Amino acid sequence: MKNDLIICGIDEAGRGAWAGPLVAAAVILPCSITQVAKLTKTKIKDGKLLSPQNRRKIVTAIKKLKVQKVVEVIGSRQINNRGITFCNREILRRLIRRVPADKYIVDGKLKLGRINGKTHKIQTLVDADATVPEVILAGIVAKVERDKIMRKLHRQFPKYNWMKNKGYGTKSHLEAIVKYKTTYIHRSIYTTTALRK
């Protein structure tokens, strides 16, 4: 690792969704991002710009390369009880507490507050999910894990088409909410606002 500095990249997936959990991942990369790209024959970039198939290929590749990854999940019930801002901060703080590293780079500009013995090691960076290899991979891991959860939830609640929309606010999702009401998987603050429009 460069200069023997252990860098942990952290990112989340699902913050703006109307249904489903918030998922975040932490990644420590023991090799260059080029090795991941070679193994997958895919350009490694912001996970939102990749197809689901390529994201899954990248996650498979980092398992083979023994990339350290840790995932945290916060469900809809806690999001409804505590709010998305609290949950977003909490899920990132959990990962920082769990993963030993010399430096933590977190996508975005959320203020995380003090974390015993680690506050000085944390850097929040806007667009880190497009520029920092560890954060790019963390975002991809979080997205793949969340998509997996949403596919399972789709089998339980097929009327909302989460297999396709992954819980985000599409027109068809809104139409399903109007017709069938919400489930305990939905986030009340988002769905209530959407129904008022």
Image (spheres, grey):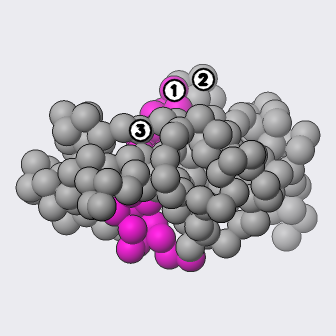
Q: CA–CA distance between discs 2 and 1?
A: 7 Å
Residue 168 marker: none
70 relative position to 21: left or right: left
Q: Nearer the viewer, residue 64 or 15?
A: 64
Judged from the image, the secondary structure of the residue bearing numbered disc 3 is strand
Q: Are marks 2 and 1 in contact (CB under 8 Å)?
A: yes
Q: Amino acid at mark 2?
A: Gln
Rendered location of residue 10, percent (x, y):
52, 54
Q: Nearer the viewer, residue 48 or 125?
A: 125
**On the image, numbered disc 2 is attached to which residue?**
156
Indicate whether 147 appears above or below 113.
above
Quadrant of the rendered image containing residue 51: bottom left
**On the image, numbered disc 3 is attached to which residue?**
69
Q: CA–CA distance between discs 2 and 3?
A: 28 Å
Q: Which residues are magenta?
A: 126-152
* Disc on the earlier residue, 2 or 3: 3
